[in-house]
Image: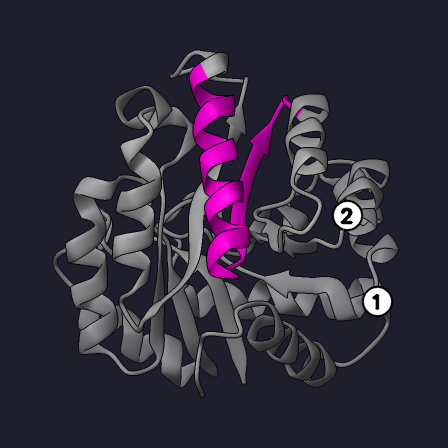
Amino acid sequence: MLVDSHCHLNFPEFKQDLNQVINHAHNQGISYMLTVNTRLSESLEIQRIADTYPNIFCSVGVHPHDSKDYNDPTLIEQLKSQANHPKVVALGETGLDYYYNNSDQIAQIECFNMHLNTGIELDLPVIIHTRDADADTLSCLDAYPDVKGVFHCFSGSPDFAKQGLDRGLYISFSGIITFKKAEELREAVKFVPLDRILVETDSPFLAPLPHRGKRNEPAFTYFVAKQVAELKGISIEEVAEVTTKNFFTLFSKAVL
């Protein structure tokens, strides 16, 4: 049993064949999925997907790209209200992205802080996107030391992984770890303790080898777990067992 801890099942790439995508995942041993929110305008659609399929959970939050559209104190009340939904098990994805800077950095930081504050208040983990923003990401986290969460689709160095681990975070790896030029990231996989690792697809993006360049989907979580197993020198069954346990430990509102 594996869990795809981060996918986007409401995205247009899945509009025509979502049932088949979910069945394919089941057939490949992906027993649970977390479909992740990026804009509050999509929240009801995401919740409907989670309500339709008993093995799918969801989150509520605002991606850093869209922070400029939601950088308002009312965001906290909106997060709280939507987090009441029984299938909402996390806040996010949120965080900082200074690579694209689709929202200005001040708006990103303020929006991120509102998610962190709400996560502590509701005792929900925060799904964190960080790109080219290591120092500010850590600074925000240090202002909320009791927050629970995960660096999703981790693409940083072993040192940055250590910084996250030192703050109590989990580290989630995606299909990027199968890419030929991702040697430093594979070193991070070796470094992070197995009991702090999650696996994900971030589908429909970043399909792992041997499917790179195609639409990603939750079924491909298998290839991420397989690469983790090879790097750790253990069986894929052990990776599946431990990462599934890690998922339900972190996302404790999720019920088997």
Foreground tag (1 vs 2): 2
Q: Nearer the viewer, residue 125 or 177?
A: 125
Q: How far across and down, in percent of the image, does residue 28 sit? A: 45, 80
> Which amino acid, mark 2?
Arg
Quadrant of the image containing the C terminus: bottom left
* Residue lying at 77% horizontally and 47% vertically, measured from the top left: 167
Check disc 2 and report the residue beneath it.
167
Quadrant of the image containing the N terminus: bottom right
In the rendered view, does 85 fall on the left or right side of 219? Answer: left
Report whether residue 9 is seen: no
Could you tell me which secondary element the residue under label 1 belongs to? helix
Membership of 254 in magenta stretch: no
Q: How far across and down, in percent of the image, does residue 27 sit? A: 39, 84
Q: Around disc 1, counting alpha carbons within 10 Å, would you say few (fewer than 14), some (14 to 19), or many (20 or more)? A: some
Check disc 1 and report the residue beneath it.
232
Q: Which residues are magenta?
A: 107-133
Could you tell me which secondary element the residue under label 2 belongs to? loop
Which picture quadrant has residue 59? bottom left
In the rendered view, does 54 fall on the left or right side of 164? Answer: left
Membership of 122 in magenta stretch: yes
Q: How far across and down, in percent of the image, does residue 121 sit? A: 50, 54
